[in-house]
Image (cartoon, rainbow, N blue to C red):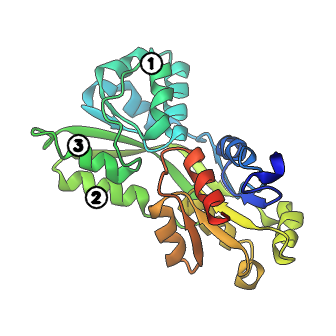
């Protein structure tokens, strides 16, 4: 029965950070794949919390908080606990989250007001644009400081889009994202060079930039490239990748795994 699954025996490199890679791996295994972990970026706590703490201590001055990743939610909630701040304070603020990330906030007892139909920062902008008195509202965006690779345009474009709505936008660094050393992936990179990897799966633009720092075009040109949603796919193509798979359903990793499986149907 197992060998009838669409991804039976397919080796798929997962470049996402470990916390995400575990979830994607599970979805791929359900389709019969053989996932290989190769997290090319990692997230870490800040070295200096001064600015983040300043914004958290005056959190009641914000009308909204827009979380664009699970990492942002984790970083903010953890820091609030370390500051002895009750996370129930989040209940008093208009919260925005993407897809299943909302479940993390709900687990903290906070109601999420905006979960966009399109699970992306652009989706949040579209939902907020429907609010008649949104102009002049103060919104906080906990985001990442990107180290070692160019920052993807996702958050800068998000900030610009909110400002076009007339919102007062404050971006605060809540955690760090950095690229990893390619030397730890000699085995995985050699498998790619030998054509023994069927798919490389990217779930973010940062992963693509970090991966491209590790190898040459000739290394992966015969490997299927899969991207988690249209924004990651568009950035991959900008960076010169020949993208074969873009998930239409990018609200969860189940949709990504299904898109990869469909390619081999």
Q: Estimate how packed mark 3 is, as few (under 14), some (14 to 19) or many (20 or more) residues with alpha carbons within 10 Å.
A: some
Which quadrant of the rendered structure holds the N terminus?
top right
- Mark 1 falls on what kind of element? helix
Inter-mark Cα distance, 1 to 3: 23 Å
Q: Nearer the viewer, mark 2 or mark 3?
A: 3
Identity of the residue drawn at 45% across and 39% down: 99
Q: Earlier in the sequence, mark 2 or mark 3?
A: 3
Residue 168 image position (x, y, % from top left) = 22, 45
Q: Is residue 129 shown left or right of residue 226?
A: left
- Which residue is identified by label 3? 128
Locate residue 61: give its quadrant. top left
Q: Quadrant of residue 55?
A: top left
Per the model, the C-alpha gap separating discs 1 and 2 is 28 Å
Q: Position of residue 126 (x, y in %)?
A: 25, 49
Q: Nearer the viewer, residue 96 or 43?
A: 96
221 with respect to 94 (left or right): right
Vertical side of 74 occupied by 13: above or below: below
| Residue 51 vs residue 252, the one in the foreground | 252
**Total tally of numbered discs in the picture:** 3
Q: Which residue shows up at 44% across the image and 44% down it?
A: 68
Instruction: Name which of mark 1 and mark 2 comes first in the sequence.
Output: 1
Residue 67 tag number: none
191 to the left or right of 18: right
The answer to the question of whether label 1 and label 3 lie on touching residues, with beta carbons closer than 8 A, is no
Percent position of residue 77, x then y: 50, 26
Q: Could you tell me if the residues under marks 2 and 3 are in contact, i.e. CB atoms within 8 Å?
A: no
Report which residue position mark 2 lands on. Answer: 160
> Which of disc 3 and disc 1 is earlier in sequence?
1
Looking at the image, is 239 positioned above or below residue 146?
Answer: below
């Amino acid at each position: 029965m197992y060998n009838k699954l669409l991804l039976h025996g397919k080796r798929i490199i997962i470049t996402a950070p470990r916390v995400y890679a575990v979830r994607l791996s599970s979805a791929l295994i359900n389709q019969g794949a053989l996932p290989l972990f190769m997290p090319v970026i990692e997230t870490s706590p800040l070295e200096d919390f001064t600015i983040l703490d300043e914004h958290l201590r005056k959190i009641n001055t914000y009308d909204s908080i827009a979380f664009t990743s699970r990492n942002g939610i984790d970083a903010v909630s953890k820091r609030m606990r370390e500051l002895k701040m009750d996370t129930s304070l989040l209940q008093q603020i208009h919260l925005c989250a993407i897809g299943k990330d909302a479940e993390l906030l709900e687990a903290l007892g906070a109601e999420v007001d905006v979960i966009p139909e399109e699970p992306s920062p652009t989706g949040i902008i579209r939902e907020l644009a429907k609010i008649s008195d949104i102009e002049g509202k103060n919104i906080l965006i906990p985001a990442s400081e990107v180290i070692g690779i160019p920052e993807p345009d996702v958050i800068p474009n998000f900030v610009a889009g909110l400002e076009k709505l007339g919102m007062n936008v404050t971006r605060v660094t809540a955690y760090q994202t950095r690229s990893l050393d390619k030397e730890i992936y000699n085995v995985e990179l050699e498998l790619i060079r030998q054509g023994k990897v069927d798919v490389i799966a990217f779930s973010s633009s940062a992963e693509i930039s970090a991966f491209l720092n590790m190898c040459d075009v000739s290394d992966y040109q015969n490997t299927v490239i899969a991207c988690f949603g249209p924004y990651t796919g568009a950035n991959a193509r900008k960076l010169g990748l020949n993208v074969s798979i873009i998930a239409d359903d990018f609200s969860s990793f189940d949709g990504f795994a299904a898109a990869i499986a469909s390619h081999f149907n």
